[in-house]
Amino acid sequence: MPRRPLPPKPRALVLAVALSALPAAMAVAQDTGVVCPLGAFTCPRQKNDFSLCKKNDLLDFYVPGLPTTGDPSLSPSDVLADHVESPDSDVYHLFGDVRLQRLDQLLRADRIDYTQSTTDYLAQGNVRYQDRSQLFSADSMRGTTEPEHGTAENVRFQMLSSRGNGTAKEATVIDQDHGYYLQGSFSTCDPDDRVWEIRSKKMTADQTTGIGRGHDVTFRVKGVPVFWLPYMRFPINNERQSGFLYPEFGNNSHAGFFFGLPYYFNLAPNYDATLTPRFYSKRGTMLGGEFRYLLGTSNGILQFDYLPRDKVTDQDRGFLHFQDSTYIAPGWAFIANINRVSDKDYFQDFGNSLTTAATSLLGSSAYLTGSGSWWNGGLGVDSYQISNPAIPDTAAPYKRLPRLYFNAEHPFGPLGGPEWGVNAEAVRFESSFRPGGERADLYPYLAWPLQGPAWFLRPELGYRYTVYNLQEPVQAGGPTTPSRGMPIFDVDAGLIFERDNVNLFGNSYTQTLEPRIYYLYVPYRNQDDLPRFDTAPLTFDFWQLFTTNSFSGADRQENANNLSLALTTRLLDDNGVEKLSASIGQIRYFDPQQVTLVPGQKITDYTGSNYVGNLQLSLSDNWRFTASQQWNPNTDETDVSTIGFQRRIGPDGVLNLNYRYRRGLLEQVDVSSELPISEKWKLVGRYDYSLRDKKVIDTFLGVEWDSCCTAARVLMRHYVRDYQGDENNAIFFELEFKGLGEYGEKTESFLQHSIMGYQ
């Protein structure tokens, strides 16, 4: 018999829609990661990777291509059946492959009986339902569509929008927004290999509030109960809900065993808070908190930890972090970043032993900033706090209370051409240990940028004037209002040559040749009577060849009669991707460099600077080689040498080999790797050895095990934990139940920092 359509009641699919609350009630929000593409050398680890899972049996009745747009409540329903019987105009019996569809909602069964006057229905035999987010099957479903009520027996479900599956012995739909379930379970594991699952004896779901409630809830691993809760309240949609978060626990050699239980407060759609009481066996009870807000013109976060009367130090301990960004008007904003600790030992005692234990300096700032198409400026304050017990408080940088800056650059005409600019700064420096003062630094300049398709030329002439108002003179009997002024002239010019069809290793490239010349002239001014508030020598590298000063800050301005010569060549593939970049350059000095950081230091009287060379090579998507060298022709010695090699191993493995040398300071070799052993097993490790000190700086070895729905990581580490050279050994363990959460020490950020390219 041909399949015959039957116009049903418009709400015939209500029960199937309402039953979708069951998977939502059992599911936990899950993240999806992005696979690291070949050629990318810094990649986040993919979270909740379910690629090792089997195809779920329920997917066998998945029907692709169902409509996904439109309002189901306003759309008609289509009904098809192999055979239809109607003893009267009120009762319908549908047999065979019965199919009821409204947009993406599809209900199928071997038989459906429907009474129009009472809206009673009974679906029996191979009952299957599908929508855009999930599939479920049941032995039978019965109920009414008006009022909406129904019960399904022996339900199995599979999420489509995220990994997750489960069962329920009985699911009762009270109405479209409320459901009641008996003996439900949920897991992200394969149905035939449930490493872990959550079981609930009774569960209710309220779609209007987005809240689910479970009674007699058990978390099981390999069928063994791990923990039990008499009651659990949880969200059943993407809306945030107040409640307890996953507990945190671990061990710290300075604070002892600790346990924390965070509670989340969903205060409003645009702000929330989390309070975390923690107990430390050696120190006492600490209260931690976090408050986040997102207002119409402002967003920020406030974090704090507070421990009253530490049992070891008998002092109050704590940490504060506040960050805010507030829009005031077009181009104007207020930006703040405040960080404070109660004492210098705080991070050593309570910090994460993988990362924050080595924090040495906390900076805080608050600024009112403004900007336009050709200018920017700001007014604010900067403060610093030493947070390492090995560093004296006297080493803290000067506070800037306040600091005002303004920068501008604009052409004289509307179509470009010559331009004027200015860089200006006024600062008041304060310190509890050294005399402070005030400084104003002004640099107006004129420039004329010229360029064509294969060349550029930019001459610039400016005058730098700096004046001080000091609490005490730098030198006995010296001025308290010293000043310094000098003209600065520089010319930057370069050419770009290209050659097509350069064949290397079987590939064709475009090669560039880019000579560059930079001349700088600054007359000498004696600066011995100027203080050193925020100035230090800059680390010499390739880009220092083209700057007007070899010092940071404004307290020192080098004298110069220099000519920088540099040459760069590149190889570009057909897509314009740079496969090779090689550069070399040197500064030629025509006058001695007489300005020194400290009066009496030796004057540099060389005819030329170090030769600086950089090389980056990545002719393949799987490997990269980098090198940077500085050779001093005046001493015939290498001052700086860094060599790095990275090899990608498959889609998620990497090997890094690095050598670092700086004459008189360090010489280290560093090997790190993420090495896949099999589909499920992976080794991670690093060996950082100081050739100069003949000791290991940091070394660790770990193993990662991954499966369909669980992952585990064990990490053994030996490292230097402070500036005195004290060493420490540690073991970190992390267990992840995918889609549910992680327990133990979080190792991801540490491994990403330690192994370049770690996923």
Image (cartoon, grey):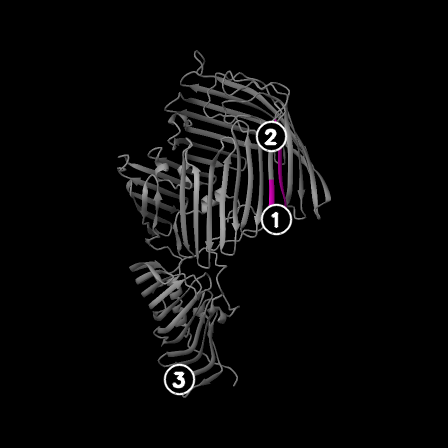
- Viewer-nearest residue: 391 or 671: 671
Please identify the dominant SS of the magenta region.
strand
Residue lying at the far front of the rendered structure = 694
Look at label 2 and name its amino acid.
Gln
Q: Categorize mark 1 by other alpha carbons within 10 Å: few (<14), some (14-19), many (20+).
A: some
Q: Which residue is mark 2?
A: 630
In this picture, residue 691 sits left or right of residue 417: left
Q: Position of residue 744 (x, y in %)?
A: 38, 49
Q: Secondary structure at mark 1?
A: loop
Residue bounds of the magenta highlight: 610-625
Look at label 3 and name its amino acid.
Val
Mark drawn on residue 621: 1
Q: Which residue is mark 3?
A: 91
Number of marks in picture: 3
Does 487 appear above or below 146?
above
Which badge, 3 or 1, is on the more N-terminal residue? 3
The CA span between labels 3 and 1 is: 67 Å
Q: Is residue 543 magenta?
A: no
The CA span between labels 3 and 2 is: 91 Å
